[in-house]
Image (cartoon, rainbow, N blue to C red):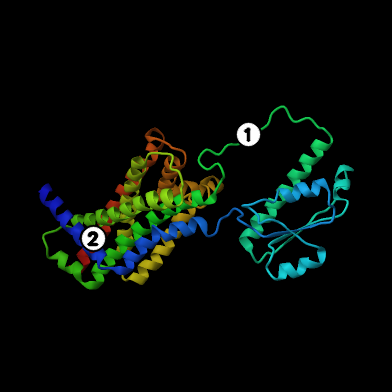
């Protein structure tokens, strides 16, 4: 009996793979999600500054002003363009400069005299992402250079204790390193739900689901085949993305055990593919499934800790999101891939994924049986 069930699941699983191979749209989506999407998400719109054009009006011509100018170095900024006040508006209007720093005359003298001179920073706010990040970055640079200059000039002794910060996984705090890995995690969740849900709806729309009802197979076997086949596709695609795109093309180091990560990914896929089946049983068409997907996927990804740290969220949201599988998957993935965590650290997430996956599978199976019964 068990051998026959395994044979049925295997045959149905191969049927799902053949159906996927005949769907060019889904194949393009898989290739894009685990190649171009990961690279562009990590590099196209970095949160840190990258080669921002800046101009400087230096009316002081002092050592302090030169220290400030020298601190505006690549890759955060382009080499500063030295301009005069009359050129400021025209250059900003033409989009040549995102920032323009105006250092007034007698700036160093006023700083050493204990006065509070004003530096003007003009920002092109139409370049929103760089403008928001860069304005604060420039303020920090100016403040640090002024404090350092005053301390050296007045021979103030350095404090006896200094804080030395070292970033283990990402010493340069390169956003692309974090973005590439997190995009894989998000795409694993998205593709697993989409593929399983679309597979069920496609069979229902084409009338092939009725054909399965007259065959000697059970709803458990049908659903298990869809879950296993789509999970295997996403797992293989994610392995390719992590090793070829992230590690190979982008040069991102991976700290922990990849077999342990893919074990967690398999448990996560068990939960999310079951969720995809459940959503497909609620929807009557592909457009309805797309609307349900938006309502479910966006909160899952936004509140799981992948986009924003969970510690910054209200405690109620943190507690509720513990019922979501990708919350535990994000915690597990970050622990393994970023910090090299082992089984002794991530076993609670593995257990949580197994429990949530089992609950979602049983819930989806009950709903799937009810759907098949209404079609019989």
> Which type of secondary structure does the marked residue at label 1 adopt?
loop
Q: Are marks 2 and 1 in contact (CB under 8 Å)?
A: no
Mark 1, Cα crowd under 10 Å, few <14 / some 14-19 / many 20+, is few
> Which type of secondary structure does the marked residue at label 2 adopt?
helix
Vertical side of 158 occupied by 45: above or below: below
Q: Quadrant of residue 344?
A: top left
Instruction: Between residue 233 and residue 306, name the one nearer to us.
Output: 233
Vertical side of 307 occupied by 152: above or below: above
Classify residue 67 as left or right of residue 216. right
Looking at the image, which residue is at 60% across and 55% down? 50
Looking at the image, which residue is at 68% across and 31% down? 162
Q: Give me the disc on residue 317.
A: none
Which residue has dot 2 on it?
A: 17
Instruction: Between residue 205 and residue 97, name the one nearer to us.
Output: 97
Vertical side of 341 occupied by 15: above or below: below
Q: Earlier in the sequence, mark 2 or mark 1?
A: 2
Q: Give me the disc on residue 164.
A: 1
Looking at the image, which residue is at 16% across and 64% down? 212
Give the mark toward the camera: 2 or 1.
1
Q: Is residue 261 something one can see in this rendering?
A: yes
Instruction: Between residue 53 and residue 339, name the one nearer to us.
Output: 53
Q: Percent from the top left, x then y, of residue 197?
A: 31, 62
Q: Percent from the top left, x then y, of residue 46?
A: 56, 56
Q: Percent from the top left, x then y, of residue 60?
A: 85, 53
């Amino acid at each position: 009996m068990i051998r026959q069930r395994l044979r049925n699941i295997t045959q149905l699983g191969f049927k799902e793979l053949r159906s996927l191979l005949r769907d060019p749209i889904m194949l393009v989506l898989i290739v894009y999600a685990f190649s171009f999407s990961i690279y562009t998400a990590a590099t196209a719109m970095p949160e840190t500054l990258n080669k921002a054009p800046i101009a400087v009006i230096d009316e002081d011509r002092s050592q302090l002003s030169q220290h400030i100018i020298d601190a505006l170095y690549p890759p955060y900024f382009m080499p500063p363009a030295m301009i005069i006040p009359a050129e400021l508006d025209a250059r900003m209007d033409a989009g040549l400069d995102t920032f323009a720093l105006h250092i007034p005359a007698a700036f160093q003298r006023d700083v050493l005299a204990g006065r509070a001179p004003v530096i003007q920073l003009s920002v092109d706010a139409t370049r929103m992402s760089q403008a928001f990040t860069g304005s604060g970055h420039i303020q920090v640079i100016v403040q640090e250079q002024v404090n350092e200059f005053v301390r050296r000039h007045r021979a103030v002794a350095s404090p006896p204790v200094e804080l030395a910060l070292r970033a283990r996984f990402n010493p340069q705090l390169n956003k692309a390193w974090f973005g590439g890995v997190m995009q894989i995690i998000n795409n694993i969740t998205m593709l697993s739900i989409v593929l399983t849900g679309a597979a069920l709806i496609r069979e229902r729309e084409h009338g092939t689901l009725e054909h399965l009802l007259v065959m000697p197979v059970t709803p458990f076997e049908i659903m298990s085949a869809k879950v296993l086949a789509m999970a295997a596709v996403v797992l293989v695609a994610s392995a390719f993305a992590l090793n070829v795109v992230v590690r190979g093309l982008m040069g991102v180091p991976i700290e922990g055990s990849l077999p342990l990560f893919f074990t967690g990914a398999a448990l996560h896929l068990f939960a999310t593919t079951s969720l995809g089946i459940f959503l497909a049983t609620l929807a009557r068409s592909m457009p309805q499934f797309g609307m349900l997907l938006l309502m479910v996927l966006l909160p899952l990804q936004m509140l799981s800790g992948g986009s924003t740290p969970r510690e910054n969220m209200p405690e109620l949201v943190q507690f509720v999101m513990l019922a979501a599988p990708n919350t535990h998957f994000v915690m597990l993935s970050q622990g393994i891939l970023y910090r090299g965590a082992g089984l002794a650290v991530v076993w609670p997430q593995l257990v949580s994924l197994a429990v949530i996956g089992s609950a979602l599978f049983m819930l989806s199976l009950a709903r799937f049986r009810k759907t098949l019964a209404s079609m019989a």
